[in-house]
Image (cartoon, grey):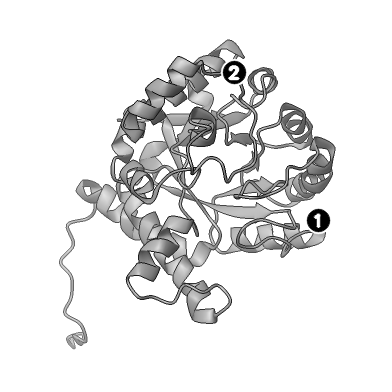
Amino acid sequence: MHRIFKYNDKIFNSSDGTIVCGIVNVTPDSFSDGGRWFSTEKAVAHALELIDQGAGMLDIGGESTRPGSTPVDPQEEIDRIVPVIRELKKRTDVPLSIDTWKASVAKATIEAGADIINDITGFLGDPGMAKVVGNSRVGAILMFNPVISRPDHPGSKIFPSFGGEGVFSEEEIERMNALPIQESMCYYLRRCIKVAHEGGVEDERIMLDPGIGFGLTKRENLLLIKDLHVLRDMGYCTFVGVSRKRFIVNILEGAGFNMDPETEEGHENRDLGSAALTAISTMLGADVIRVHTILHHRMHSEIGNAVRFAEAMEDTHLKQYGAKKSSQ
């Protein structure tokens, strides 16, 4: 299915292949790189390095949403990321996505030049978000968030609150809990899309995210990746974030690999394991992959794209390894 995504005056076409989106965490406490880029200068330098390595998009965040994290005041979030946006807009035309679920933060970042709002609640956390985006020309990424759809689930209780209280009735929450995770995701995202439409956000400005790693079990994470077609069949471009997620560590630890981030090998293995899922997700049709490192993921995404678009590849006869050119 051919899909497009619009933001401001730009258009992304799903037939162009997967975009690798680099993460820029302007936070002191993100789960894997908190504090490394916690200043405007360091964040901008890191962002430009990611672009040099091949990032086709950046996702900038000023609040950690990892399990056990502390919520950040909206003004603090604005103060962290708006200077980064302004500086990057002077130096690159790579689209800037802002990772926030708060309407006031979104408004400030849009005014500063943001291209896309990446809302991990899918417009359900802050009732003002859809209208803020609707009154602009930016794009929106709407994520399935099980922390909101099943608040009493063990996986949800370790996360901070993302708002959304009362969006779903008790009966709806019970229904989503009883559904297979793929169907629960679709139920949740259909509500997000309805809210987006009511706020004035057209379909072509919407991208969907399956919410990998947010209050999901290992099995549920893997099923949402394996069945990515379920998300794609909703008719929108897809945004997938698998980089350094805990279930990857769990899988590889169980297989006997060193996953200790305090060691060089363990840190590298986290990115290698993540990149394997990037290849798989790309092959299955993910349009944007959100990652911490570009070099690992760009290579794996290229392989995934080659398989995904195999019918369009040149039918080239490949030379034997080590074969010498014949003399004239």
Give the residue at mark 2.
166
**194 or 137, which lies in front?**
194
Q: Is residue 325 visible?
A: yes
x, y (%) of residue 72? 77, 42
Q: Residue at x 39, y 37 (%)?
A: 14
Asked if residue 290 lies left or right of residue 94, the reply is left
Q: Marks 1/2: CA distance?
A: 37 Å
Mark before the other along the chain sequence, 1 or 2:
1
**314 or 6, which lies in front?**
6
Query: How many marks overall?
Result: 2
Q: Is residue 232 visible?
A: no
Task: Name above or below for residue 54 compared with residue 206.
Answer: below
Q: Element under label 2?
A: loop
Q: Residue at x 40, y 65 (%)?
A: 273
On the image, which quarter does residue 184 sit in?
top left
Task: Name above or below for residue 45 compared with residue 155.
Answer: below
- Location of the N terminus by quadrant is top left
Nearest to viewer (mark 1 / mark 2):
2
